[in-house]
Amino acid sequence: MSPNAVITCFLMVLPVVILSIVALFFPKKRIVFLSLALFVSTAEIIILIWEKDNEKLTVMENIIAVESHLQERYPGEEWFIRRREGVFLDHGGIEVIFLNELDRGYYYTVEGDQVRQSGGFFKEGADRDEKHAEEGP
């Protein structure tokens, strides 16, 4: 589990735990505090689900945009395309590996309607020739 995930979980559980503990000390207001804890936890769950759905939607839109860009720029070529992985990364980043250049990958980002290559990676001992490197805007 990443440090970000641990901190997020802690911060989301903390208000519910505090409200539950406070409910133990105030028997007359117990229902109010427990109801508030239930409301807070429900709101947090809804926010987490919305964030994940929004992230998936962004990734799918970006994959479609990058796919269109690649078909325009490299007709007749084939590639693997997937979301870029990492804890601290922008979740809309796309990673592309061309089938005729399997030892090298390229990162693409989508900003508005602009698709641009934002870097890449290569395997150790790979040929330094970048067949699909694109110049900046």
Image: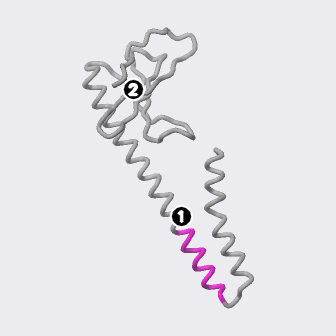
Which of discs 1 and 2 lies nearer the camera? The answer is 2
Q: Relative to residue 129, is residue 22 drawn left or right?
A: right
Vertical arrangement, residue 12 with respect to residue 37, above or below: above
Amino acid type of the residue that numbered disc 1 sits on in the rendered structure:
Glu
Residue 4 on image: x %, y %? 62, 48
Q: Relative to residue 36, is residue 21 drawn left or right?
A: right
Which residues fall within the magenta stretch?
29-42
Tell me how far mark 1 sits from mark 2, CA to CA.
35 Å
Vertical arrangement, residue 19 with respect to residue 8, above or below: below
Which one is in front, 110 or 54? Answer: 110
Could you tell me which residue is drawn at 57 percent across and 74 percent down?
A: 38
| Quadrant for the N terminus in the image | top right
Which one is in front, 45 or 4? Answer: 4
Total count of labels: 2
| Residue reaching furthest to the right | 25
- Residue 106, image quadrant: top left
Residue 85 on image: x %, y %? 52, 36
Could you tell me which residue is drawn at 29 percent across and 38 percent down?
A: 113
Question: Residue beneath label 2, please?
Answer: 117
| First of labels 1, 2 by sequence position | 1
Residue 87 on image: x %, y %? 57, 40
Q: Main secondary structure of the magenta part?
A: helix
As helix, strand or loop, the secondary structure at mark 1 comes to: helix
- Asked if the residue under mark 2 is in contact with the one under mark 1, i.e. CB atoms within 8 Å, the reply is no
- Residue 90 inside the magenta-drawn segment: no
Mark linked to residue 44: 1
Amino acid type of the residue that numbered disc 2 sits on in the rendered structure:
Gln
Residue 134 on image: x %, y %? 36, 19
Could you tell me which residue is drawn at 66 percent across and 75 percent down?
A: 19
Could you tell me which residue is drawn at 46 percent across and 54 percent down?
A: 51
Q: Relative to residue 15, is residue 99 drawn left or right?
A: left
